[in-house]
Each structure stands twice: as C-alpha cells, then as structure tokens.
Image: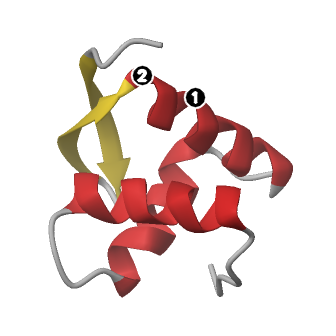
Amino acid sequence: MSDEIVKHSVNISGHRTSVSIEREFWDLFAEAAAARDLSLNQLITRIDAKRTGNLSSAIRLFVLREVTGASQDI
C-alpha cells in the first residue's frame, strides 16, 4: 500500500480545480463513481455541493463512508 498523494485536475460545474488525494482513496472513489454510473466530475460536483470543508477531505470522507457502508445521499 502506498501513501503517495496524487494531484488530480477536476471540473466542477465548468470550473477547473485540483484535488490532492492518496492513490488508494482515488481508486476507491473511481469505483464508487462507476458503480453509480457517474463520471468522476459528476460525483465530485455532487460532493462539492454538500461539503462544508476542504474538497479533498470531503472526497476522502465520502470514500470512508462507502467502505464502511454508511448511508449517503449523493
């Protein structure tokens, strides 16, 4: 397991930004997007609309809730 942090360019409602997330979190995030039949940008846009803190942290928390089975309204 690697703790390598990778910077990803994303598009949120037409606005380009970047998030820095460990590779393992990003891989699980991509799986969650695919399971919902959403693009990564679509899922990030949904998370962005509900977050209160840092976007990278919000994505990590989303993944944590996914793997623990916590209910999410995304």
Q: Mark 2 points at which residue?
A: 23
Model colouring: secondary structure
- What's under tag 2, amino acid-wise? Arg
Circle 1 residues within 10 Å: few <14, some 14–19, many ≥20: few
Question: Which is more toward the observer, 26 or 70?
Answer: 70
Secondary element under disc 2, as helix, strand or loop, is: helix
Q: Which residue is drawn at 42% across and 22% down?
A: 23
Q: How far apart are marks 2 and 1 (CA)?
A: 6 Å
Q: Residue at x 55, y 44 (%)?
A: 40
Task: Name above or below for residue 53 compared with residue 59.
Answer: below
Q: Residue at x 64, y 45 (%)?
A: 39
Question: Which is more toward the observer, 2 or 30?
Answer: 2
Q: In this view, does 61 lie to the left or right of 68?
A: left
Circle 2 residues within 10 Å: few <14, some 14–19, many ≥20: some
Task: Name above or below for residue 71 compared with residue 34.
Answer: below
Q: Quadrant of residue 5?
A: top left
Question: Which is more toward the observer, 45 or 63?
Answer: 63
Is mark 2 in CB contact (under 8 Å) with mark 1? yes
Where is residue 60? Give x, y as percent: 39, 54
Q: Quadrant of the C terminus?
A: bottom right
Q: Name the residue under label 1.
A: 27
Task: Name above or below for residue 8 compared with residue 34.
Answer: above
Q: In this view, does 25 lie to the left or right of 34?
A: left
Where is residue 45? Give x, y as percent: 43, 65
